[in-house]
Amino acid sequence: MSDLHVDFLGKRLAGPVIPASGTFGFGEEYADMYDLSVLGGICSKGLTLNGKYGNEGERLYETPAGLINSIGLQNPGVRHFIDEELPRMLTLGTTVFANLGGGCIEDYEEGARLLSETDVDFIELNISCPNVKQGGIAYGIRPDSAKEVVSRVKAVCKKPLVVKLSPQAEDIARMAAACVEAGADALSLVNTFQACAIDIERRKPVFNNLFAGLSGPAVKPIALRMVWQAVGAVDVPVIGLGGITTGADALEFIMAGAAAVQVGTANFMDPRAGGRITAEIGEWMDRHGVKNLDEIRGCARG
């Protein structure tokens, strides 16, 4: 059988598929559905230094080829995660990515410092969060803002740092390069795309915040393009995500150069998606005589 493992920042991941932040809780609910040890890891619900209740009003809206969400980073906070959720995550037989957000650099720094003292394997830094000190513009839009937050977090972070990029970036290749220059050990992309929906019966926007994040199959071709651009701009591992629902989808990202992939919206469509997609990758490799992922990683780039 084909070897699906991925060597990633000093860790040996069992496979290339990682459930994405915000789509898999803290993993415990899925442990009875399939063997989570086949996964490359589990990415935690997005965490902020202090807990958040999230957005009011409608939070999820289905589209013909995806899902729009306006959750608002509802989470119990970093300290609660460390005390209550992390011990259970560490028993699930796979690596742990702690996804960290924040409204100001100081919150990012303190969250990273606290998580660095735990047994999490990686910290995934979500720079799509709005900078509350600068009018709410997300850190991940302008390379100079991203560079500042990444460099300051890197200075206090003792864990391998994966920076998660937003598709709202002014230039995804420049953003990728800026984050690596600031100290990112790896990148993941992309986060959700800004979108809107209107309730024609109420004649009003569906979401209280007007715009929300679109994910799912509709975004895959655009996400794949951005991953291609990021891989070409940096020399660190890149995790690709955006609309992956099948093993074939995942293989496209790997052939574009991604070290691994994350699966998000598919987990709502099929709670066993992570295991199924992993199996589909292996089946394709067996049919084509591909012994390991290194043989095909980046092969589409020529």
Image (cartoon, helix red, strand yellow):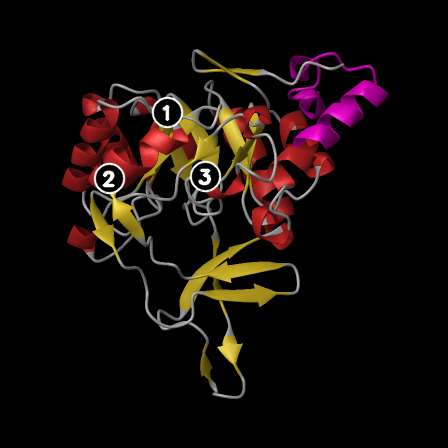
The residue positioned 68% from the left and 14% from the top of the image is 3
Please name the predominant secondary structure of the magenta segment in the image: helix
Secondary structure category for the residue under label 2: helix
In this view, the residue in front, 166 or 29, is 29
Amino acid under disc 1: Phe
Q: Residues within 10 Å of mark 2 (few under 14, many from 20)?
A: many
Lower sequence index among marks 2 and 3:
3
- Residue annotated with mark 1: 122
Q: CA distance from mark 1 to mark 2?
A: 14 Å
Residue 150 in view: yes
Amino acid under disc 3: Glu
3 or 1: mark nearer the eye: 3
- Residue annotated with mark 3: 28
Q: Position of residue 28 (x, y in %)?
A: 45, 39
Secondary structure category for the residue under label 1: strand
- Residue annotated with mark 2: 78
2 or 3: mark nearer the eye: 3
Residue 148 bears which disc, if any?
none
